[in-house]
Image (cartoon, helix red, strand yellow):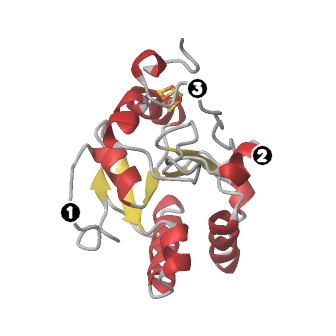
Amino acid sequence: MVKVRFARCDICPLVDRPLVHGQKGRRKNLVLIGEAPGYEEVEGGVPFIGKAGVKLAEILDVLNCNKNDLYISNSCLCHPVNEDGENRAPTQEEVGCCNERLLKSLEALKPTLVVALGMTAYYALTGNKIDKFSPVVGKVAKTKNGFSMLPTYHPAAGLRNRAYLPLMKRDLELALSIVEGVVNVN
Ligand code: SF4
């Protein structure tokens, strides 16, 4: 069964889980990629509308950017849960099954910059397995398929550790400067 073009749902452990498509905002130059949908996203049918999404919107508002204007999606489109039915991060296997779909979506949009929200998105976009996220945060790199990418903390991590929130704001401000041509990364 293939739920989305270019996805390997036939071998994906999440094949029977609900799917949430990306938010297609009017701006295509800046794309945000997270982990996977949670219960609130499944209910609303849109990524990043739970507490983490509200925090993301708050930070973007301060930077004069409306979250609804952006293209926002996830490393995996389907909702992963643990044995107790709680939200969990997707595994590397699940990320791998959904990866060509993610990379093809970037190739269709051709964004100036992709922001990787958290280590799962960083892995999905680069293929690099890292033990510590902090050394790569805020440093522009390239996705597997050659797009400029800026890793920053996932807003859910910012809610758990508020010390990450100013770093997220710093990185999103840099991201907006890059797509507006104020800062050149090429
Ligand atoms: S997460 Fe991706 S690959 Fe897995 S079932 Fe959902 S759409 Fe298919």
Type of amino acid under label 2: Glu
Report how far apart the C-alphas of labels 2 and 1 lie in the structure. 33 Å
Q: Which residue is mark 1?
A: 131
* First along the sequence among labels 2 and 1: 2
Q: Which residue is mark 3?
A: 16
Residue 160 is left or right of residue 18, and the answer is: left
Q: How many marks?
A: 3
Taking the spot 48% from the left edge, 72% from the top edge, the residue there is 157
- Visible in this render: residue 26? no
Pick the front one: 118 or 57: 118
**What residue is shown at x 54% (from left), y 35% (from top)?**
109
Classify mark 1: helix, strand or loop.
Answer: loop
Callout 3: 10 Å neighbours few (<14), some, many (20+)?
Answer: few
Identify which residue is drawn at 41% across, 69% down. Answer: 183
Q: Which residue is mark 2?
A: 43
Q: Is residue 127 left or right of residue 8?
A: left
Residue 81 visible in this rendered orientation of the protein = yes
Element class at badge 2: helix
How far across and down, in percent of the image, does residue 131 sit?
20, 63
> Measured from the top left, where is residue 64 in percent x and y?
69, 74
Q: Mark 3 vs mark 1: which is more N-terminal?
A: 3
Q: Earlier in the sequence, mark 3 or mark 2?
A: 3
The three-letter amino acid code for the residue at tag 3 is Asp
Spatial separation of the CA atoms under disc 3 and disc 2 = 16 Å
